Image (tube, rainbow, N blue to C red):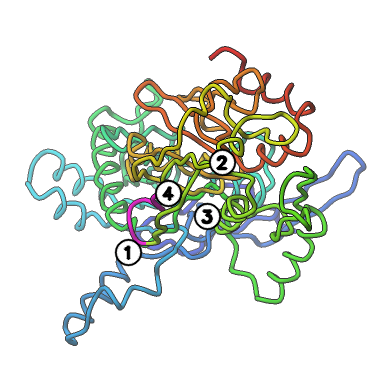
């Protein structure tokens, strides 16, 4: 049998994206001398839209809208079926790029000389890259085949490592966009181990343009709640129901504290949240069950920029909000319970994970200075880069809790907002003393 050498990106062409004519066989023998193999495989680039379900081609969307206008229909209605997508992509030929660059300047001459084409993909959340690499491809921890950035290629082969896309604003989009620029006949400078400076500059300029074009269609994408993304095809209803039953069995949500949800002492939602909708339901149950007593909800919106409006409140009898480690551990210290108050309307955000909200801050979809309270299930890890957290369920910090039920304060160099991390709130109520070491080691005693 003829075993071709494994050439991952041979016959790479953006303009066509068809399977390569180059075929290969690959055999892998493990340490137990067991051999597995794949035969007659096509060597081609791993285009994100092939790996991620619900990826939308912007060219086709524009064609549908143009046809709708010609037929006297509302073009916005035509594309409603594409909403809540995982990503959008666009392929531009050299002619497209020359028209976009407009002027017949040095850049346009280079586009024509090297027959430059480009591919751009924009994903709703950077967690999708993690899902592809860690779960779908099951690569070793930390290894990334697909990720955000700019990849240069020449004559059908990728060249060099990915480059950071030089955005000057909405820099979070650098990590959500995967851009590939392809040259023909632009042999890299082997001495410099890279392309000529003017070609790299041109590629970076095209990448910025593509990111802007893709992000103009962000309205088609899912909201980044920080929940685990679904990058495979959507599951059938019976599979979804079965998975939820299994999840309920494996991850029950239990609140053992005897002071809440009387007389049943049980929360209606029976399993650990897996989505932003679950977070909203659980949070409302905690308010209705008297677990959280310092918040009054005014409105919830699915269309406005932010999720809802609320007030901080303190109502009679004031003893219901006074801290007591056993009977009211989410309360505030008695010295602060001096009067009844009804705070002004403020902005509330729901997320599955704080990571989702931070991604929206970085992408400038939302402004952290506008947020007064964030409700989420999981703290995530993105906060470690730019935020400090004060834990109010660390018993040494109770004096900093000014409203009943708040679990954390999140601070950056320019803003500060309150948070309720529902997972850590439940853990705290179930074992107040047991969670202290985690809170102190995770967030520190003196921030």
Which badge, 2 or 4, comes first in the chain's sequence?
4
Instruction: Return the mark for residue 44.
Output: 3
- Horizontal and vertical percent for residue 188? 36, 32
- Give the mark nearest the N terminus, 1 or 4: 1
Element marked by disc 2: loop
Q: Earlier in the sequence, mark 3 or mark 1?
A: 3
Image side of residue 214 versus residue 254, left or right:
left
Marks 3 and 2: in contact by CB < 8 Å?
no
The quadrant of the image that shows the N terminus is: bottom right
Q: CA distance from mark 3 to mark 1?
A: 22 Å
For this orientation, the residue located farthest to the front is 317
The image position of residue 306, as x and y in percent, is 37, 50
Residue under the image location 68 percent in, 33 percent down: 329
Q: Residues within 10 Å of mark 3 (few under 14, many from 20)?
A: many
Q: Viewed as shown, does residue 436 lie left or right of 200?
A: right
The residue mark sitting in front, 3 or 1, is: 1
Q: Is residue 293 above or below residue 20?
A: above
Which of pointers 4 and 3 lies earlier in the amino acid sequence? 3
Q: Earlier in the sequence, mark 2 or mark 3?
A: 3
Residue 363 part of the magenta segment: no
Dominant secondary structure, magenta: loop
Q: What residue sits right under mark 1 in the picture?
A: 58
- Residue in front for this viewpoint, 150 or 112: 150
Q: Which residue is mark 4?
A: 156
Whole-number angstrom distance, CA of label 1 to CA of label 4: 24 Å
| SS class, disc 1 | helix
Farthest residue, direction top: 446
Q: Which mark is residue 317?
A: 2
Q: Nearer the viewer, mark 2 or mark 3?
A: 2
Report the magenta residues as a range.
303-309
Q: How many marks?
A: 4
């Amino acid at each position: 049998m003829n075993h071709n050498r494994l050439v991952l990106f041979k016959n790479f062409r953006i303009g066509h994206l068809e399977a390569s004519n180059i075929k290969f066989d690959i055999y892998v023998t493990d340490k137990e001398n067991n051999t597995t193999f794949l035969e007659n495989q096509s060597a081609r680039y791993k285009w994100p839209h092939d790996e991620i379900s619900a990826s939308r081609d912007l060219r086709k969307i524009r064609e549908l809208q143009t046809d709708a206008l010609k037929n006297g229909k509302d073009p916005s209605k035509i594309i409603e079926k594409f909403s809540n997508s995982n990503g959008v992509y666009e392929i531009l030929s050299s002619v497209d790029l020359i028209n976009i660059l407009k002027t017949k300047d040095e850049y346009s001459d280079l586009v024509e000389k090297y027959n430059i084409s480009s591919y751009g993909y924009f994903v709703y959340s950077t967690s999708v890259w993690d899902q592809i690499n860690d779960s779908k491809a099951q690569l070793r921890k930390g290894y990334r085949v697909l990720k955000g950035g700019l990849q240069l290629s020449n004559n059908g082969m990728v060249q060099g490592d990915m480059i950071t896309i030089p955005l000057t604003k909405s820099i979070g989009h650098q990590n959500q966009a995967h851009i590939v620029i392809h040259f023909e006949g632009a042999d890299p400078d082997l001495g410099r181990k890279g392309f000529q400076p003017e070609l790299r500059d041109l590629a970076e300029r095209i990448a910025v343009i593509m990111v802007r074009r893709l992000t103009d269609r962000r309205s088609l994408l899912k909201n980044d709640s920080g929940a685990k993304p679904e990058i495979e095809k959507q599951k059938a209803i019976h599979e979804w129901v079965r998975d939820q039953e299994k999840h309920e069995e494996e991850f029950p949500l239990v609140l053992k504290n005897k002071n809440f949800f009387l007389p049943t002492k049980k929360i209606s939602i029976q399993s650990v949240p897996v989505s932003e909708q679950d977070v909203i339901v659980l949070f409302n149950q905690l308010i209705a069950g008297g677990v959280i007593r310092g918040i009054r909800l005014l409105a919830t919106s699915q269309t406005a920029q932010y999720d809802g409006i609320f007030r901080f409140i303190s109502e009679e009898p004031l003893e219901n909000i006074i801290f007591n480690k056993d009977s009211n551990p989410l309360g505030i210290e008695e010295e602060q319970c001096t009067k009844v108050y009804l705070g002004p309307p403020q902005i509330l955000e729901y997320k599955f994970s704080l990571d989702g909200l931070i991604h929206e801050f970085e992408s400038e979809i939302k402004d952290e200075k506008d947020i007064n309270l964030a409700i989420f299930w999981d703290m995530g890890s993105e906060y470690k880069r730019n935020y400090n957290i004060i834990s109010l369920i660390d018993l040494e910090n109770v004096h900093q809790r000014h409203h009943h039920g708040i679990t954390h304060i999140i601070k950056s160099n320019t803003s500060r907002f309150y948070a309720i991390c529902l997972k850590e709130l439940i853990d705290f109520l179930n074992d107040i003393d047991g969670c202290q070491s985690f809170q102190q080691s995770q967030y520190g005693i003196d921030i």
